[in-house]
Amino acid sequence: MIAFVALLRGINVGFARKLPMADLRALCLKRGLHRPETYIQSGNLIVDAEIDADERRILLEREIKARFAFNVDVVVRAAKAWQKYIDANPFAGEDDVR
């Protein structure tokens, strides 16, 4: 079982693109994904699966379209890959400039 992070683009930002996180978690469980966790209404999802990242992306995009009747672009990466992204952050250590 591999932990994945999925980022759903452009949901819960307008009237027509509402996707309740409880419904997203239920959809994941129904489709054989394990331990789905979401963060607020962001569309950020962590889930365990036995399929690879691209298969998981295709599954989520297809099932969201079928259930909620709108297209959502989904980015999926293995959770362990995120450390590489953190380490490559060119702004790490810089003060917050506002």
Image: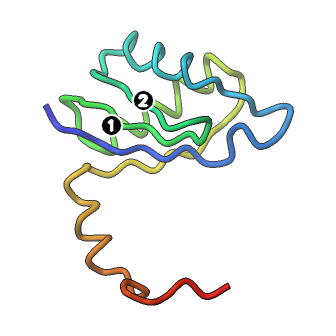
Q: Is residue 46 left or right of residue 19?
A: left
From the viewer's perspective, tell me whether residue 21 is left or right of residue 52: right
Label ID, residue 59: 2
Give the farthest residue toward the top.
Answer: 30
Q: Position of residue 50 (x, y in %)?
A: 18, 29
Find residue 87 and report its image quarter: bottom left
- Please give the name of the residue rendered at 26% of the width and 49% of the height, measured from the top-left corner: 79
Residue at disc 1, secondary structure = helix
Residue at image position (23%, 39%) is: 3
58 or 33, nearer to the observer = 33
Circle on res. 84 = none
The quarter holding residue 36 reads: top left
Q: For mark 2, give the secondary structure.
A: helix
Q: Quadrant of residue 72?
A: top right
Q: Nearer the viewer, residue 18 or 95?
A: 95
Amino acid bearing label 2: Leu
Tag 1: amino acid: Glu
26 is higher (above) or lower (below) than 54: above
Per the model, the C-alpha gap separating discs 1 and 2 is: 6 Å
Quadrant assignment for the N terminus: top left
Q: Circle 2: is it few (<14), some (14-19), or many (20+) Cα within 10 Å? A: some
Residue at left offset 56%, top offset 25%? 21
For the residues labelled 1 and 2, say whether their Cβ atoms are less than 8 Å apart: yes
Relative to 14, 51 lies left or right: left
Q: Position of residue 47 (x, y in %)?
A: 32, 32
Say which residue appears at 23% left-offset and 65% top-offset: 83
Find disc 1 in the rendering and name its residue: 55
